[in-house]
Image: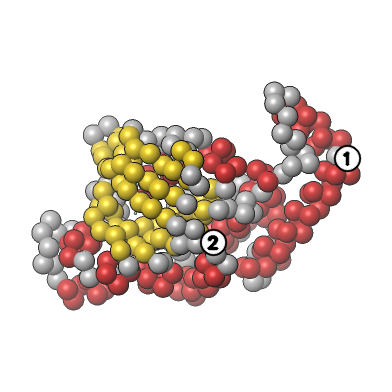
Amino acid sequence: MLRVSGLSRSFGGVHAVRKVDLALGEGETIGVIGPNGAGKTTLFNLLSGHERPDAGQVMFLGQDITGLPPERLAALGLARTFQHGRVFGNLSVMDNVLVGATPRLRRVRPAVPFVGPLLELILAMVRPAGVREEERALRAEVEQLLAMFGDRLAPRLTHRAYSLSYANRRRLEIARALALHPRLLLLDEPAAGMNETETEELQEILLTLKARGQTMLLIEHKLELVMRLCDRVVVMDDGAVIAAGLPEEVRQDPAVIAAYLGHSATGGKPALVEVVL
Ligand SMILES: Nc1ncnc2c1ncn2[C@@H]1O[C@H](COP(=O)(O)OP(=O)(O)OP(=O)(O)O)[C@@H](O)[C@H]1O
Ligand SMILES: [Mg+2]
């Protein structure tokens, strides 16, 4: 589904991502781990079109998507969440999630060249029966989607996002990404800042998504979550992939241990590693 080859991006003298190769199959969940500043978020930004690579190629569903803008990628079925939560504070929970479904709209966005945006504006204002029906169906779908989060979001449908708790804003972002019906879902530290109960709850949700066949790339520092959820793990350090494999293999890789301990050489302290991994 996704094949990344030789992907690189520098900021001034900082090589944030260096020649990264990565392959992800349909239905697979891959964890991307590594110390702070390893280049994980930059890798996601390159995949989701928020940054353009200096070199390398990204193939998605057999198509070269290198350097395409986020809206084109969303239309192809690529959704993401952000490390530092980006919901629309002044929109309701319902509207935040509906925004995620925008690329799926058909009746209000007829694929007409040139005059398409103008037509969309007119249809949105006139709201003929077909448009109203499409919106009604989507609203019902959003309510169903939110049920996945128990009573965390469903009772707050009309609340504006800025009034939500931190954890709820993070859940809302996941719901918005899911509203796209993504072929590939990129999650950047979805459990960051969540307490133990909230993290476990999130883990259950992600396991449910995985069981439904959702393909996912997950950046996460909470390694227990990564080990439970991921089929394979890719480890980055200093912009490069330093190890990749099954969670169990990666856990014992000396290069990974060294990176996490901040050692340049291997042979760190195994006792400490148990704490980290
Ligand atoms: N827009 C930017 N301009 C300049 N430097 C950047 C930019 N984005 C990232 N960097 C640098 O690139 C490196 C990789 O950053 P990145 O955010 O990708 O790391 P990360 O692995 O996601 O770290 P963390 O675990 O802390 O989120 C860092 O040195 C960072 O300072
Ligand atoms: Mg990051």
Mark 1 vs mark 2: which is more N-terminal? Answer: 1
Q: Residue furthest top?
A: 114
Q: CA distance from mark 1 to mark 2?
A: 34 Å
Q: Residue furthest right?
A: 129
Who's the residue at 60% across and 42% down the image? 75
The image shows residue 247, relative to residue 241, as above or below, that is below
Image quadrant in which the C terminus is located: bottom left
Amino acid identity at mark 2: Gln
- 252 and 92: which one is in front? 252
Q: Is residue 192 left or right of residue 157?
A: left
Q: Which quadrant would residue 157 be assigned to in this image?
A: bottom right
Mark 1: C-beta under 8 Å from nearest atom of ligand 1: no
Amino acid identity at mark 1: Pro
Color style of the picture? secondary structure
Q: How many marks?
A: 2
Q: Is residue 26 visible?
A: yes
Mark 2: C-beta under 8 Å from nearest atom of ligand 2: no
Q: Which quadrant would residue 211 be assigned to in this image?
A: bottom right
Q: Nearer the viewer, mark 1 or mark 2?
A: 2
Q: Residues within 10 Å of mark 2 (few under 14, many from 20)?
A: many
Residue 177 disc label: none
Q: Of helix, strand and loop, which one carries label 1?
A: loop
Q: Which quadrant would residue 257 be assigned to in this image?
A: bottom left
Q: Is residue 155 left or right of residue 39?
A: right
Which residue in the structure is indicated by mark 1? 128
Residue 81 locus on image (x, y percent): 51, 52
Which residue in the structure is indicated by mark 2? 214
Who's the residue at 66% across and 71% down the image? 151
Residue 121 locus on image (x, y percent): 77, 31
Q: Is residue 221 visible?
A: no
